[in-house]
Amino acid sequence: MKRLFRGLIRLVLIVAGFLFIFNLPSLLGIGKDHIEINFERFWVNLTSDFQFLFQSNQDKYLEMLKKLHIVESYQYTMTILLSSLLFIIFLAMITAILIFLSPEKVKNKLKSGLNFFEGIPDLLIIFLFQFFVITLYKSTGLKFLQLYGLFGHKPYFVPIMTVSFLPFFLLLQFLIKIIDEEQYQQYVLYAKAKGMDRIRILLVHIMRNIFPLLILQLRTIVWILLSNIYLVEILFKISGFNQQLFKIIFMDGEFSVLVLCLLMLSFPLVVIETAGWFISKLIKGKGAVSI
Amino acid sequence: MRNYEKTIIGSTLLLLLLIMSLLYPYYGPKDFNHQVLVKNEQGDIIGRAPFPPSGQHLLGTNRNGEDMHWLLLYGAKFTLISAFGVALLRVFLGGIFGIFLSMWAPFLKGYVKDFFLTFRYIPSILIAILLMIPIVGDFNDVAVSSIVTYQIIILVFIGFPSVTIFASDVTDQLLQTSFVQSSKLMGAGKLHIVRKQLMPYIRSYGILFSVQQFISTLHITMQLGLFGMFLGGRNRAGVMGYEEPPKPATITNEWAGLIGQNFSEFVRAPWAILTPVFGFFIVIVIVNMMKNELEGNLNGVKVVKEKKKKDLSPKVAAYSADQFEFVQK
């Protein structure tokens, strides 16, 4: 009973927080030369938004969603997200393993080189990719890399590359850090003492043990990917999900459609968080058994 | 043990940039070497802005024929001051609120987290755009000061929840340490603990947080600039050749505004966008360097203790074969 009550309070708070954040502009009105705080207007907008949330006006929403091709664009954006995620994980794993198999001196150099990529703004990467594709086209006349999403084109290759660039380095850095820490664990030392070769220890034993940590880290990666995809879609004029969202925002669309779209946008994060939750629970359970 | 070399060098560089930018009116050309058409001796037009980078225009010019390097130098102060101010405000307000939560109202922490849950699931750039649109989304005739105040409030608000929760987490951890616990047992009040025990940590964490928030503010203003939400609002008819309908231009020439203003020229004049982005990049690299050093300093205290513990483990010495002797020869 108490838990139910708490859950109810939390739900109310989440909705209240959401409404508060999105109605902040009506609280802080802007005067000719100063900021006006207007509680009355704030309250009116808040309640009307609240009513919008719970009004069932399904036909209208469906019509609007159809008009904006929400389903197709959502599929497209999620395809990009998923493929770049898989691409990043695959590539980062392979690179991390290669770095660990390389000689000590090279390894240290590579590690300090990785730190450099931490500070690069995502916009710079996007612009550089754009610049590269355009100059490639200008100098060779070949158009094998499609950049812009005009006339309903849905390019895959360049957006995925652009979006995955920085998260790849982030994940690689993380992997190297945790594999480094794992090197001094008892089981690794034991395996080494038994004479197992390095590749087998790394591939079988260490990989198995860092897997849960990797899943937990994926939330950050997905988060960065989402905001990068947002920027890429707007800059490359690709009509993906975020572009539709942008239209809804700028056309001052229905509040509930906006909420629905935001929920759809945060869905991958929820999925990855649930996965992380289950895995951490699994580990805790195992720990309890072994103790 | 603690060194602040990189931090000192980095902040000196940023300060130098800021001072140069502040003193710009005293030495720089007022119109940024405004020059749209280039004519030869006969009076024929041989070139039209934007010009590519060359000896005459170090970083090229934009569509208005203004030199990018002068523009960058002039606009640096707005970018740096606003980002730094926002970062400080975020850390100050968020830090106070976070410490308050941990010390006096720990039961509220979960609820505060729930209240700001939206920030965990929606990219902050989206929230920023949504909140900025009503004010900066279009041309308006409101005083610049009120627009800037509004923008700063929004920017501070966006970073506030994460700072609060982070500060509260750090305080919670510190409250578990033995010196705070023993101070509590000896009857110290909460205010005393904050003032005496937590203060040194608050100082160093405060600096670290400010540096982190500085970077994140730079990122967000850069992205907002891309969407035409410049610091200080939009300026009509600031771009040559786009008088009707007016194309938004930045009033202050701050870097994010330069990116947004020149973005449509990407194919013709990529330098006009790449230079401000590189400017951001350089500032962020400097600040990131400072951040890494500060983080290292903070962790250094713990690392030293751990190392001492490790030394206690039994030493494995190597014995060579000639040190052994068979008992029965």
Image (cartoon, coloured by chain):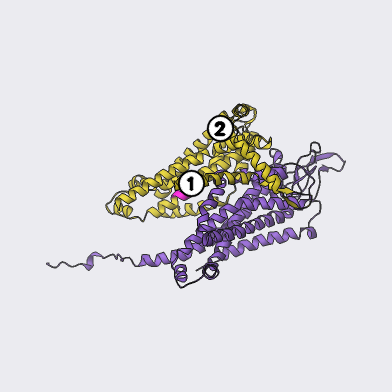
Chain colours: A yellow, B purple
Q: Marks 1 and 2: in contact by CB < 8 Å?
A: no
Judging depth in this view, the residue of B187 and B98 nearest the camera is: B187
Instruction: Report the residue marked by disc 1.
Output: A5
Residue A283 as seen in the image, left or right of residue B273:
left
Residue A175 as seen in the image, left or right of residue A44:
left
Predominant secondary structure, magenta span? helix
Find residue A74 and report its image quarter.
Answer: top right
Judging depth in this view, the residue of B322 and A31 nearest the camera is: A31
Q: Is residue A172 magenta?
A: yes
Q: From this viewpoint, is residue A247 visible? A: yes
Crowdedness near tag 2: few (<14), some (14–19) or many (≥20) residues, C-alpha within 10 Å: some
Expressed as whole percent of the image width and height from the top left, the position of residue A144 reads 58, 30
Residue A269 as seen in the image, left or right of residue B59:
left
Q: Is residue B45 magenta?
A: no
Expressed as whole percent of the image width and height from the top left, the position of residue B52 reads 72, 44
Measure how far apart labels 2 and 1 are at the Cα level: 35 Å
Find residue A45 and report its image quarter.
Answer: top right
Q: Which mark is residue A246?
A: none
Instruction: Report the residue marked by disc 2.
Output: A74
Q: Magenta segment range?
A: A169-175
Crowdedness near tag 1: few (<14), some (14–19) or many (≥20) residues, C-alpha within 10 Å: few
Question: What amino acid type should be assigned to the residue bearing mark 2?
Answer: Tyr
Find residue B249 and report its image quarter.
Answer: top right
Which of the two labelled residues, at mark 2 and mark 1, occupies the earlier sequence position? 1
Say which residue appears at 57% left-offset and 36% top-offset: A159
Secondary structure state at the residue bearing disc 2: helix
Figure check: B4 above or below A66: below
Question: What amino acid type should be assigned to the residue bearing mark 1?
Answer: Phe
Judging depth in this view, the residue of A202 and A141 nearest the camera is: A202
